[in-house]
Amino acid sequence: QVQLVESGGGLVQPGGSLRLSCAASGSRFRINAMGWYRPAPGKQRELVATITSGGSTNYADSVKGRFTISRDNAKNTVYLQMNSLKPEDTAVYYCNAHQVIRATAYDYWGQGTQVTVSS
């Protein structure tokens, strides 16, 4: 079982920056990928950015060039640096940890952290 603790959300003006952090604990198995998701119309959650344990990244088109995901494997922590924030980035951001153990996939979610972009 993986526990995820998120931090770093808040209120920022358009064009500003925020950095989200998510620390994972509680599992002796490798976490294959970590990432950030947010609610989207017609979907429960949409991918914002993900990163594998090997460092491969994937971004939503809407955040490419503005957001950067990084990971400290030693600390089991993932970061999301968000620059040039827009009002449409306002959402609750959820951290995800994805494990594959003996060919079975497990997904864990954080409690969410609110990001509000407003003047």
Image: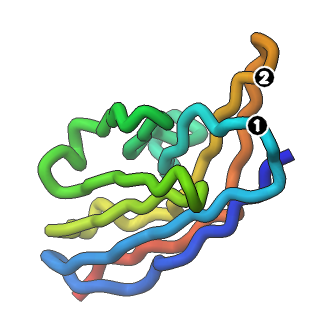
106 to the left or right of 56 = right
* Element marked by disc 1: loop
- In the image, taking residue 3 as reference, residue 63 lies left or right, namely left
**With respect to residue 13, does 91 lie above or below?**
above
Q: In this view, does 30 lie above or below 24?
A: above
Q: Which residue is drawn at 70% across and 60% down?
A: 4
Q: Of the residues shown, which amino acid type is indicated by label 1?
A: Phe
Q: How many marks?
A: 2
- Which image quarter is the C terminus in? bottom left
Task: Find disc 1 in the rendering and name its residue.
Answer: 29
Q: Which of 34 and 112 is in front in this view?
A: 34
Q: Could you say where residue 42 lies in the image, as x and y percent from the top left?
A: 50, 34
Tell me residue 101's x, y (percent).
78, 22
Asked whether the beta carbons under mark 1 and mark 2 sit within 8 Å of each other, the answer is: yes
Looking at this view, is 108 or 113 the one in front?
108
Cα–Cα span, label 1 and label 2: 8 Å
Q: Which amino acid does label 2 sit on?
A: Ile
Q: Which residue is more in the foreground, 82 or 11?
A: 82
Q: What residue is rendered at 81% in x and 14% in y?
A: 102
Seen as rendered, the residue at the extreme right is 1
Quarter occupied by residue 51: top left
Query: Image height check: is 73 above or below 60?
Result: below
Q: How crowded is mark 1: few (under 14 residues within 10 Å), some or many (20 or more)?
A: few
Rate crowding at label 2 as few (under 14), some (14 to 19) or many (20 or more) other CA atoms within 10 Å: few
Secondary structure at numbered mark 2:
strand
Q: In which quarter of the image is residue 94?
A: bottom right
Q: Which residue is drawn at 22% across and 37% down?
A: 61
